[in-house]
Image (cartoon, rainbow, N blue to C red):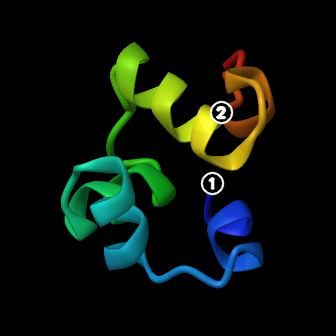
Amino acid sequence: MRALRLASDLSQGELGEALSVSRQTVNAIETGRYSPSLPLAIKVARFFGRSVEEVFHVDDD
């Protein structure tokens, strides 16, 4: 998500505002401390014009 945000020239705060979440939530998602809910993941993907799978990757540990 960070790469998409930077490519769109958005700050964490601007993206948070566009998604109706806090800057801290954006930061937590980008650093892997928080996994977004499905509705938020869909909202993020739609915002960037991508599929959820393109934005979020599941690690098979």
Measured as percent of width and height from the top left, residue 29 is found at: 41, 50
Query: Could you tell me which quadrant the N terminus lies in?
Result: bottom right
N-term mark: 1 or 2: 1
Numbered tag placed on residue 1 in the rendering: 1
The answer to whether marks 1 and 2 mark residues whose Cβ atoms lie closer than 8 Å is yes
Q: Residue at x 52, y 23 (%)?
A: 42
Q: Residue at x 26, y 55 (%)?
A: 25
Q: Judge left or right: residue 2 versus residue 12.
A: right
Q: Judge left or right: residue 3 versus residue 18.
A: right
The quadrant in which residue 46 appears is top right
Q: Residues within 10 Å of mark 2 (few under 14, many from 20)?
A: some
The quadrant in which residue 49 appears is top right
The quadrant in which residue 5 appears is bottom right
Badge 1 element: loop
Real-space CA distance between mark 1 and mark 2, rounded to the nearest whole angstrom: 7 Å
Compared with 12, 42 (above or below) is above
